[in-house]
Amino acid sequence: MKAWMLNNFGIEHLQMQEVPVPTPGPHQILVQVKAVSLNYRDKAIVEKKYLPHLMPASFVVVSDAVGEVMEMGSGVTRFKKGDRVIGCLYQNWIDGKVQPHDVSLHALGGPLNGALAGYVLLEEAGAVLAPASLTDEEAATLPIAALTAWFALFDHGNLQPGQTVVVQGTGGVSLFAIQFAKAAGATVIALSGSDEKLQTSVKLGADYGINYRLKPNWQHEVLAITNGRGADQILDVAGGTSVNKSIEAAAPGGQVAVIGFIEDVKAEINLLPAMIFNAVKVQGILVGNRQAFTRMNAFIEKHTIKPVIDTVYAFEDAKKAYQHLDRGALGKIVIKGPVL
């Protein structure tokens, strides 16, 4: 089969090669890949910024994929041949807020072989049925971006109708968060450095938009919108100095979900007055578990939520897709599976 392999760190070492089709072992399924989507994690792995010590010398890249079950190993009971399935990033995290201690060793797209190939091997326990309401390209966007937003808002944040949510940026996680929060009855405040992108956020359901380039102290704007109370949940995808602004913008007892590290992997947090006196919870989010994935898919179908896709690339144009991700995208970047 054709597969995009990372043979050393750096985009120049990402190469399309011919490799053997894997054989499913006990409780494994072989899935023909229909589409994959890119995440910042994929870019960071190639650039040696994401757990490089765990990565093997050569492996198939990209974690997020949808496809059709073609073969099954012994003992498989959750799926049958022909089922359309999505792989979970963490193949061994089934339930619970706290992930297994070795979760990073069981991640698709590094260190496990990923899905930018003709076929991908999944654990039976590490896959879910794809929502029938979504196309292959749409379903491929769910495993990291959508589930991260869902897990932050609902599993950790216990989002309730009438609460206020702040969402940073217009990447995949952020646009899913806007749609999920709005469907759950929350008031949504969207942040972006582009007025044009803020218009997209409003179309998806955001009630307010703040251009953080024009108003760099956006936390003050959030407080003004909420009559000084602050937001119940803030999804911080930037990291770095952004975290303190998120804490300042949070309501008493609110949650700052730290999701990304685009600005910086380190943050110097001011403990007083906002964090301690307002009892703000700073919660790290590491995507989510399989059971949450299943609940999210049901919610997506119930509320007819549609992922926002920026561009769909052909399999052979995978490097162009990575370069697009590096420039930034409005929503998700998708790559079709190879023609077999």
Image: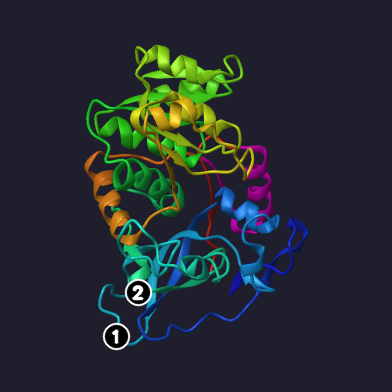
Q: Is residue 314 above or below residue 100?
A: above
Query: Disc 2 marks which residue?
Result: 124
Q: Is residue 231 above or below residue 293?
A: above
Helix or strand or loop: what does disc 2 sit on?
helix
Q: Is residue 145 left or right of residue 295?
A: right
Boundaries of the magenta span: 310-328
**Residue 116 highlighted magenta (yes or no):** no
Kind of residue at disc 1: Gly
Q: Is residue 317 visible?
A: no
Depth check: give the residue in front, 80 or 74: 74
Image quarter where the N terminus lies is: bottom right
Which residue lies at the image location 30% right of the left edge and 54% below the top edge?
292
Residue 75 got which mark?
Answer: 1
**Quick check: 78 above or below 331?**
below
* Residue at left offset 64%, top offset 58%: 45
Percent coordinates x, y for residue 219 in the rendering: 49, 20
The reply to whether the magenta stretch includes residue 319 is: yes
Q: Residue at x 49, y 22 (%)?
A: 198
Tell me whether the residue at label 1 lies in contact with that at label 2, contact meaning CB atoms closer than 8 angstroms: yes
Label 1 and label 2: CA atoms lie apart by: 9 Å
Q: Is residue 25 visible?
A: yes
